[in-house]
Image (cartoon, helix red, strand yellow):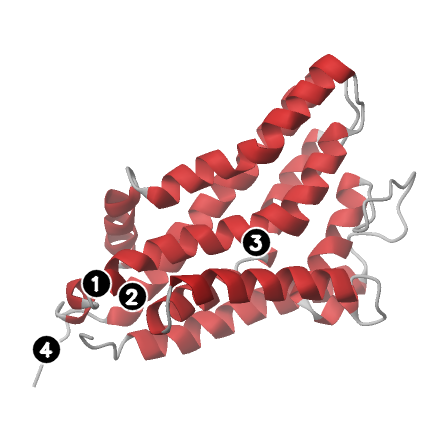
Amino acid sequence: MKTSYYLPIATAVRAEFLKGHRNTPLKLALLMPLILGIPTLVLTGVGGFGIMPTLLWNYWYSLLLPITLCLIASSCAYWETKIGMRAVAGLPVNKAHIFLAKNIYVWLLTLLSNCEIAVLSTIALALGSHGPTTIEELTATLLMTVMTAWIVPLTLILTTVVNVLVGIVIPALEHIALYIALWNSRFWWAIPSSALGRVMQPLIHVLPSGELIEGYTFALTSWQCLTGIGISIALAALLVTVCAHWYARVEVK
């Protein structure tokens, strides 16, 4: 009978950071925001476009953030799948803790990317642009991290079970497609992908379609927003629990 030893989550997370601090996940977390950030600063400083920080936030959370998340999570799971899960399956510890640590690691890198967007937005504001206030930026940073957390376990498990391409494409396309199709629907709050766009609206003062708005169409504390946030968190918790249960039984391929 195989003995399973207790693995502290903090130790498992630290191991993920040690594996990834010079590898692809951290590089993606730092470089992906610059795809939008550098043009934002250039157009603000040279062209005098005053709304660039608002557009930076809008296109980041709606398009580039889910892609970044999937790339980071998939690259985090790729190394184990490349060697047939031998590095994980042979460990005498609860594999569910390893899976949870991978999620926490990717969530922290996501927070890092979102903070980088906030910094770039602040720099653009200092150059004379108009955009979210500091409090709105901090709130948006936290909400983007929390409301997209469900993408991570889905990407990790698809990469492990199928392959890297499926792990990246399916969650990213699903999120973007639902966001585009349902953000203006009656039940937008019930779908995490569309709820994110509507929750961000009173913070960055722009509709998910990209149209600027002058005021708030509803409060961030409305029942729709709070329900959408709650459903996003619940979905992330459900996916982590279910996927961790499967991951705990992983065997060498």
Residue 144's spot in the image, x, y percent?
61, 50
Badge nearest the viewer, 3 or 4: 3
Mark 1 near mark 2, Cβ–Cβ under 8 Å? yes
The residue labelled by disc 1 is 7
Label of residue 187 in the image: none
Q: What element carries label 3?
A: helix
Foreground of the two, 175 or 230: 175
Of marks 3 and 2, which one's residue comes earlier in the chain? 3
Q: What element carries label 2?
A: helix
Residue 89's spot in the image, x, y percent?
18, 71
Location of residue 155 (image quadrant)? bottom left
Location of residue 98 (image quadrant)? bottom left
Tell me which residue sits at (87%, 53%) in the image. Answer: 218
In the shown orientation, is residue 122 left or right of residue 129? left
The residue labelled by disc 2 is 97
Mark 3 and mark 4: Cα distance apart in space: 38 Å
The residue labelled by disc 3 is 66
Q: In the current view of this chain or complex, which residue is farthest to the left?
A: 1
Mark 2 near mark 4, Cβ–Cβ under 8 Å? no
Badge nearest the viewer, 3 or 2: 3
Count neighbours of disc 2 (C-alpha within 10 A) and say few if under 14, some if 14 to 19, many if 20 or more.
many
Label of residue 3 in the image: 4
The quarter of the picture where the N terminus appears is bottom left
In the shown orientation, is residue 147 left or right of residue 159? right
